[in-house]
Image (cartoon, rainbow, N blue to C red):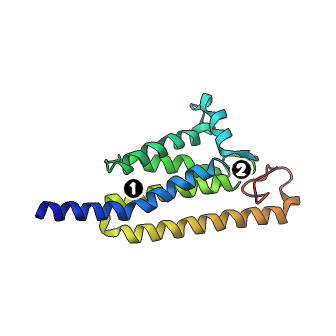
Amino acid sequence: MAIEQDLTQKNKETYRRKPLLYTALILFILSWFLPAAEGYLGLMIVIQALPFIWYPLAWPVSANMMFYTIYSRLDDNKAVSPWLPCLMLFMMIPGSLGLAGGVLGWGYVIWVVSGILLFADWLGSRKPQKRRLIVRLAVVICLIWTVGLVGIGLSQKKYHHRFEEKPLNVFYNTWGFK
């Protein structure tokens, strides 16, 4: 009887964790079909960057592979090495810091949000007692990050005459199309 109760508790914990994991996957897939950078769809960027995976500007493509690895391990309730989710986020974020020039679109934003949610799910699996706090914090971080990027883009659009020498970055064109 104790074994059945223990398995039931484990199934409840797994069931509670799955919506965040599946939301991250849905957003990840959605991001491939939206303009991500310079008006190109995310899927096209991945396909074009695969041969140059060793080049630092193509590292976000490696983050896609890490995302899939982390997702599949979490979905199977297997352990994930702590460095892998951290490295995935490290490779996703530089575009929003202006390190990859050009116009970034909603595909990029949704892609990074999916990575943050996957990271939160991984962290919640390591600290189940703090799971609710971690999920709430991840949602707040996603909102602040997205609103900040849109604000930067709108300010660049408003004051575009000051940025003519430099490439405009992060939502100069809010929808990401050329």
**Residue sitting at the far top:** 51
Query: Number of callouts in the render?
Result: 2
Q: Is residue 135 above or below residue 123?
A: below
Residue occupied by mark 2:
35
Rendered location of residue 88, percent (x, y) = 49, 47
Rendered location of residue 72, percent (x, y) = 41, 45
Q: Are marks 2 and 1 in contact (CB under 8 Å)?
A: no
| Three-letter code for the amino acid on which mark 1 is drawn | Trp
Q: Residue at x 64, y 52 (%)?
A: 108
First in sequence: mark 2 vs mark 1: 2
At numbered mark 2, what does the secondary structure look like: helix, strand or loop?
A: strand
The one of 151 and 27 positioned closer to us in this rendering: 27
Rendered location of residue 96, percent (x, y) = 64, 54
Which label belongs to residue 122?
A: 1
**Residue sitting at the far left:** 1
At numbered mark 1, what does the secondary structure look like: helix, strand or loop?
A: helix
Tell me which corner region of the image, top left, top right, bottom left or bottom right, holds residue 134.
Answer: bottom left
Q: Residue at x 61, y 56 (%)?
A: 110
Circle 2 packing at 10 Å, graded few (<14), some (14-19), many (20+), is many
Residue 19 appearing in the image: yes
| Three-letter code for the amino acid on which mark 2 is drawn | Pro
Rendered location of residue 68, percent (x, y) = 47, 44
Circle 1 packing at 10 Å, graded few (<14), some (14-19), many (20+), is many
The one of 130 and 40 positioned closer to us in this rendering: 40
| Distance in Å between CA atoms under marks 2 and 1 | 27 Å
Q: Residue at x 66, y 45 (%)?
A: 42
**Residue sitting at the far right:** 161
Q: Residue at x 74, y 58 (%)?
A: 171
Task: Specify the quadrant that holds the N terminus.
Answer: bottom left
Residue 115 appearing in the image: no
Which label belongs to residue 66?
A: none
Drawn side of residue 129 relative to residue 5, left or right: right
